[in-house]
Amino acid sequence: MRQLILIGAFTVFSLFATAQEAKIDETFENITEIEVDVIFSNVNIEATDGNTVSVKGLIEWSNTKQDFEIITEVRGTTLHIEVDHPRNVKGNTSGNFDIKLPSLTDVKVNTISGNVKLNGVGQQSIKLNSISGNLNGDKLTGDVKATTISGNIYLSDIKGHVKTSSVSGNLKLSDVDGNLKGSSVSGDFRIENLKGNKEISTVSGSVRQN
């Protein structure tokens, strides 16, 4: 038994010893829009006071023969955040980004399997896209477009129109000031306090509105 425990401990140590990582901890001024294009990463964005955008992120991967890099670029008043990665990713990869920015900032997020969470941001438009991660937005201003394949979509307190698309994920939307246009193959819609018109299409999912 003692030998098995030692072997297990050595295996865990070996995994951590060979793990690779890339980090970012930067601030930016006078940004009105951010574009986040990352891989296998959770993205958390929330409003803060002031005129500064704060970006903290970490990517970890297990394959020592591959390399990842976090790249930032300012184009006018738009901040672009990207994870440069191998074409064919092998091994375990995970990441997390925490971004704080002024409330009147438009946001675009694209990730593969990570969850996306936004709170209190937006001016004209919010665009969220994930393959298998959940999309969660609260107190957003502007038109919102949220797309996912198998993840769930949760949107509440939206000051604008909403367009959603999901294949198998469920969708819950509440307190939407504008119109709602949604589509799903097998996901269920739960709608509360929609002030505008709705246009919903689903194959086998249900639609319930209060």
Image (cartoon, grey):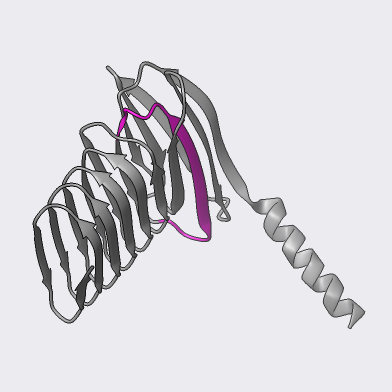
Q: Is residue 32 left or right of residue 100?
A: left
Q: Nearer the viewer, residue 155 or 22?
A: 155
Quadrant of image for the N terminus: bottom right
- Measured as percent of width and height from the top left, residue 82 is found at 38, 37
Residue at the image position 29 percent from the left and 19 percent from the top:
77
- In the rendered image, the vertical position of residue 66 relative to residue 193, given as above or below: above
Q: Is residue 141 left or right of residue 92?
A: left
Quarter residue 31 falls in: top left
Q: Is residue 208 left or right of residue 25?
A: left
Residue at the image position 49 percent from the left and 42 percent from the top:
97
Residue 95 among magenta residues? yes
Q: Nearer the viewer, residue 192 or 113?
A: 192
- Measured as percent of width and height from the top left, residue 148 is found at 27, 60
Quadrant of image for the C terminus: bottom left
Judge whether residue 66 can be spotted in this image: no
Quarter residue 132 falls in: bottom left
- Measured as percent of width and height from the top left, residue 134 is found at 38, 60
Residue 132 among magenta residues? no
- Segment tinted magenta in the rendering: 89-106
- Measured as percent of width and height from the top left, residue 4 is found at 83, 79
- In the rendered image, the vertical position of residue 188 relative to residue 43, given as above or below: below
Judge whether residue 149 can be spotted in this image: yes
Residue at the image position 31 percent from the left and 48 percent from the top:
157
